[in-house]
Image (tube, rainbow, N blue to C red):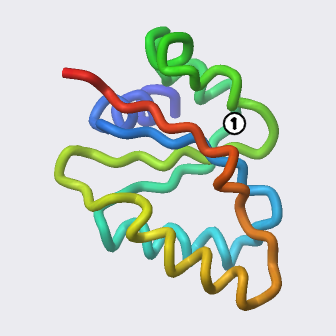
């Protein structure tokens, strides 16, 4: 599991750490579908697994360490991916219309690789 996640993270140019509190399985499935449509992956992870898969640079310099608490999912976007926001916008609107809080994207932290 750590190796697979580390490979996914390694291919990602942009990483968001999100708190998925308030989302049920149907919501997460819908979000994954929308993000995949723009070439972005949504991976629910245990914080310990995420710490092992993320590099020291991403954790410390990228500022991701402080966001690895509570229910965590990673949004992973590669160079050929669309923007994660494109996939998430319709999802967030649907959640609001349903009267659900949804994932707290205000806590999302982005780490962008510099090449």
Q: Position of residue 37 (x, y in %)?
A: 33, 73
Looking at the picture, does residue 17 appear above or below residue 34? above
Label 1, residues with CA under 10 Å away: few <14, some 14-19, many ≥20: some
The residue furthest front is 106
Examine the image and state in which quarter residue 28 appears: bottom right
Does residue 65 appear to the left or right of 41 in the view shown? right
Name the element at disc 1.
loop
**Would you say 92 lies left or right of 84 here?**
right
Q: Position of residue 79 (x, y in %)?
A: 20, 45
- Foreground residue among 4 and 32: 32
Q: Which residue is pictured at 67% across the width and 51% down the height?
A: 106
Of residues 61 and 50, the one nearer the viewer is 61
Q: Is residue 86 above or below residue 61?
A: below
| Residue 26 found in image quarter | bottom right
Q: Nearer the viewer, residue 19 or 109?
A: 109
Q: Residue at x 27, y 61 (%)?
A: 82
| Position in image of residue 92 (x %, y %) | 61, 74
The residue indicated by pointer 1 is 46
Q: Which quadrant holds residue 91? A: bottom right
Q: Residue at x 54, y 71 (%)?
A: 31
Give coordinates of residue 29: x percent, y percent: 58, 73
> Which quarter shows the C terminus?
top left
């Amino acid at each position: 599991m750590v190796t697979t996640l580390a490979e996914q993270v390694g291919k990602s140019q942009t990483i968001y750490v999100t708190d998925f509190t308030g989302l049920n399985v149907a919501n997460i499935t819908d979000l994954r579908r929308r993000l995949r449509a723009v070439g972005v992956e949504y991976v629910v992870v245990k914080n310990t697994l995420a710490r092992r898969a993320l590099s020291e640079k991403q954790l410390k310099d990228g500022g991701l360490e402080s966001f690895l608490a509570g229910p965590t999912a990673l949004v992973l976007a590669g160079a050929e991916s669309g923007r994660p926001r494109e996939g998430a916008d319709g999802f967030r609107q649907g959640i609001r219309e349903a009267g659900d809080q949804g994932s707290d994207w205000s806590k999302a932290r982005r780490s962008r690789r510099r090449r």
